Amino acid sequence: MALKMVKGSIDRMFDKNLQDLVRGIRNHKEDEAKYISQCIDEIKQELKQDNIAVKANAVCKLTYALALTWAIFLQRVGYLAASQCFHEGTDVIMLTTNQIRKDLSSPSQYDTGVALTGLSCFVTPDLARDLASDIMTLMSHTKPYIRKKAVLIMYKVFLKYPESLRPAFPRLKEKLEDPDPGVQSAAVNVICELARRNPKNYLSLAPLFFKLMTSSTNNWVLIKIIKLFGALTPLEPRLGKKLIEPLTNLIHSTSAMSLLYECVNTVIAVLISLSSGMPNHSASIQLCVQKLRILIEDSDQNLKYLGLLAMSKILKTHPKSVQSHKDLVLQCLDDKDESIRLRALDLLYGMVSKKNLMEIVKKLMTHVDKAEGTTYRDELLTKIIDICSQSNYQHITNFEWYISILVELTRLEGTRHGHLIAAQMLDVAIRVKAIRKFAVSQMSALLDNAHLVASSTQRNGICEVLYAAAWICGEFSEHLQEPHQTLEAMLRPKVTTLPGHIQAVYVQNVVKLYASILQQQEQAAEAEAAQEVTQLMVERLPQFVQSADLEVQERASCILQLVKHVQKLQAKGVPVAEEVSALFAGELNPVAPKAQKKVPVPEGLDLDAWINEPPSDSESEDEKPKAIFHDEEPRHVRRRQPEEDEEELARRREARKQEQANNPFYIKSSPSPQKRYRDAPGVEHIPVVQIDLSVPLKVPGMPMSDQYVKLEEERRHRQRLEKDKKKKRKKEKDRKGKHRRHSSLPTESDEDIAPAQQVDIVTEEMPENALPSDEEDKDPNDPYRALDIDLDKPLADSEKLPVQKHRNTEVSKSPEKDEVPVVEKKSKKPKKKEKKPKEKEKKKERERKKSSRHKKKKHKKEREEKEKKKAKRKQPEREHEQEEPVQNGAAEEEEEETLPPMSSYRLLAENSFIKMTYDIQASLQKDSQVTVSVILENQSGSFLKNMELSVLDSLNAKMARPEGSSVHAGVPVPFQLPPGVSNEAQFVFTVQSIIMAQKLKGTLSFIAKDDDGATHEKLDFRLHFSCSSYLITTPCYSDAFARLLESGDLSMSSIKVDGISMSFQNLLSKICFYHHFSVVERVDSCASMYSRSIQGHHVCLLLKKGESSVSVDGKCSDPTLLSSLLEEMKATLAQC
Amino acid sequence: KEKKKITRELVQTVLARKPKMCSFLEWRDLKIVYKRYASLYFCCAIEDQDNELITLEIIHRYVELLDKYFGSVCELDIIFNFEKAYFILDEFLLGGEVQETSKKNVLKAIEQADLLQESQNEEWGGLSEDIL
């Protein structure tokens, strides 16, 4: 192995690299073609090596050679290879510039076309610069085929070489009015692409496009133009007004969905860009929404999806017109397709209002129950939360309802979003003061309810909720109805199975709870009960002290000491409640997530400067143990966002008030006027609908949000009655509401619904002097920005495209187009002349051969058929063996009709004494040997002996003879044949070239001995070595097959045979059997097949059956072998 | 290499989708439009502003072209004559834009280019025999 590698690398040293190749080609001017084919042979060798670098080099060379010598080789394939493997870093491209230029100016339009196509795939800035002027010339080529391609490729050139845009643009504009529709649409395409990136430079073209739009009937072009207008209108509102009419006409008239969709999209874009001053504005919105409704109602999933997508665009600016289609969107939630459901969910987000929030969420909740697959269910969950919490809980009128929804969501199994629910609970409980009492009761129920803790290990997601529950119960413990029970729930041994960060919160809040219980009991002068509680704490806390989680351990041991101390004091009868609860005095304020970022950096403070000298290396080692603690911290902080550094605060609670004065983080924001108003009535005065709630409160954790819906309806009904009285005043309000749309305040009809609770939504705190953040930066790397060029300025001289001039000919630029081809022709002509006569000779020769072959075959066929039947009868065993490849072919499907049994033995010769049949077998081990098995059958009554087979060798094929015998000597048959007996003899032949079929003349001589005496007899025969006999059935997997075809060094040929009645299955079996192929893959009446010759030629076939014909496409490493094989196959198929 | 990675990723996501689903999906900052014809999937990546339906039309048109050219096309045709499939695509699209909407014209161009290539092939074949 190692040796092989060394050998490989030495070989590589001698490989030519690309530069060598180019140099070599230049040095062999006179016999260029010969040199190149030599190189290609080398390249082929290189391609077969394992080393990937060698391979890559070879491919580069090959493509170069192919591109360079298009007259000789397949330039089309060359460009294809180039477009697949060239990229901007490939240095070969530099070398190809001249070749491409030559091809571009080729007299054949297809050569030019291929060059353009290839160029579009691998154009580089350099190529673009060098070739821009050539392509420009091609834009006014006489053939539309070239013009079209040239126009399209200009876009790629512009991208790579923006300087070319200005000089080329006038001509591009001309092409918009080209007589050929293809060229015209190409120009539209290019300009639309350009304009989409930098619309403002193309406004001047608007009238031209408008004309095109109203006159064109080509939908492909129309779509592009309409898209272009969509980009232009934001810059020119007048254009938008003009557009609406033709667009609505199109919407009405077109039957093409794609055009309709594009029109609707553009109308939406136009309407968005227009200020609401349009007169028929709402009419066209209505039209769009109507059409979209039709799309959504369509059974085609694609249209449905796009309809919803477009709806969501309208929703942003005209939510009201979409809201009327709520039914439809809700219907889409039941769709089978997940992506449609997700789109519908997106729409719902924008459709909710105070009126329908409960209804929509109720619907979503039923979907949550039905949903299969956690991903979609999780998506639903987040959407519910998003919908409810959007714009600062704007649409929620009843927070009790929301809390119960959240509690219901906790029953979801296996969700990953437990922390989301937890965050919502915390947020609502902290910011909505009025709801705290209710929230606390619900949370204590959650804590009490064992189901969350029970299986916390399996559904670790949802137990996050307990984190919120514990915190809320602790922090707002004054609202607890049965604090003692909750305390016990929190101290249950099962709690220790929860994740560490949740346990930590448990521990912390147990103390808060404890403090408030103490206070209550001391006020009620129940000293004994207070001591009992303390005792409970002392008993249960040790289970946390043993926790593996450091945070839990730390807090627990700290608190245990505290409680023990309290216990001592209690024993002495000292009132402790005041002091314990003082630990948790004060209130926590929500801080806006961005607050930290918004704190302005004080002048003169350099945050990057070292405060002390940087620690030396030895010190940093000492610090390592600390890191263990640091590691844990970030995780905790992240998870409980709402009360960041809660632990720290708790410790410093005493000092907190003073700190607030000078700490920028805790400066209370100046409350908004609205908030101040709502603040005024204290918590006690808030009218909570308590009576109706008594039932749900006692069935905690049960689905009860439904009842709120009913309640809400009743309440609204009552309100409506009241409202009727005040109608006049309301109307005025409505009008005012419209102007305030941009603020996050409830608007329009939403305002009619008064919230069930006066809710104080505490705004998140921000530092006073927060910096306004505008991070609108444009991406400097955007490739399209380079094309932001003013096109209306006149061209400056310096902007002319670089034009390459011929060194020796001093000609003006214009004749360049004509001049290059002339040079070209001269260089090509001699080559062609040389070739042609030879070509003709070859053809004639081939034809002669073919015709002679045909005649012989016809004779044989009839005989062969008889022969087959006989052979079959006599050789049952052999038959079985030979059947195997047939089954190989039939493996994929049950045989439809029974195939006549096949035998590969063919008649060699026959007379009254003896009959000879033969088969040729090849083996992979010997690449130039075949074995001919001859069955000799005695048909006479004589005894046959001294049989000897002599064959006239040809240059190519020789019979292997025993050593020492002369070249012409015969080979004896190693047996004798009594009357009626048959036996088989094998002879080995060596074959040089296997690419053509051939025949060998031979004679069998023998002595026939009967009662009368012995006679000397002879039988002449012709051994036919068909190409198929050199093939060996080799299985091939489809991916290996594809790779083989991709390698590209196979030549191709095909035949077609008409009048075939046999089933495709049998056809395949026949080919597998007689020609030693195996089926790679079969699809309906199309199959790919593979075989390998003894000399390693790959042969790939594609068989396709039509009505009554079969076409065979073949690819093979040797073209001659392939054509011989196909000829043989044609003969086989002709019998079918 | 990058190409391979993208291909693998897309193949996985597209194949995972059920036949009843719609043929658009969002992927990175592009949209993928795919369509299934029997066992063949055709995928296009388009930009945000592009029209999905017209992309479906393009795919369909391309399949029609393949079908016309190969005569009831199947994946084996494409594996076997992958370069032909590329040529057709090149005749139909250029630089990501439709260049020829007429089926007849595309096929005409392909057939003529085929003829041209074949004649070149023969020249090359003749030459190779000279050398051998």
Image (cartoon, coloured by chain):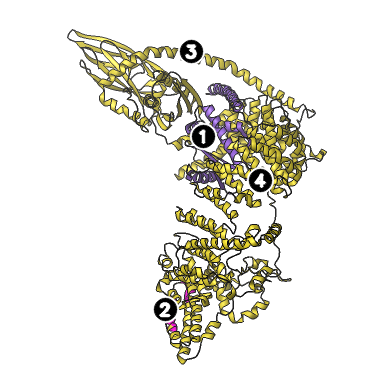
Look at chain A in the picture and name its colour.
yellow
The residue to which callout 2 is attached is: A540
- Viewer-nearest of labels 3 and 2? 2
* Label at residue A848: 3
Q: Chain of mark 4?
A: A
Q: Choose between A547 and A496: the one closer to the eye.
A: A496
Number of marks in the rendered image: 4
Amino acid type, label 3: Arg
Secondary element at tag 4: helix
- Viewer-nearest of labels 2 and 1? 2
Secondary element at tag 3: helix
Q: Chain of mark 3?
A: A
- Chain coloured purple: which letter? B
Amino acid type, label 2: Arg
What percent of the width, then of the height, locates residue A226? Answer: 68, 39
When asked about the image quadrant of residue A1068, the answer is top left
Name the N-terminal-most of marks 2 and 1: 2
- Residues at marks 3 and 2, CA–CA distance in whole angstroms: 107 Å
Mark 3 and mark 4 residues within 8 Å of each other at the beta carbon: no
- Viewer-nearest of labels 4 and 1? 4
Asked whether the residues under marks 1 and 3 belong to the same chain, the reply is: yes
The residue to which callout 4 is attached is: A285
Q: Chain of mark 1?
A: A
Amino acid type, label 1: Ser
Asked whether the residues under marks 2 and 1 belong to the same chain, the reply is: yes
In this orientation, does residue A986 appear?
Answer: yes
The residue to which callout 1 is attached is: A1047
Q: Residues within 10 Å of mark 1 (few under 14, many from 20)?
A: few
Boundaries of the magenta span: A533-553
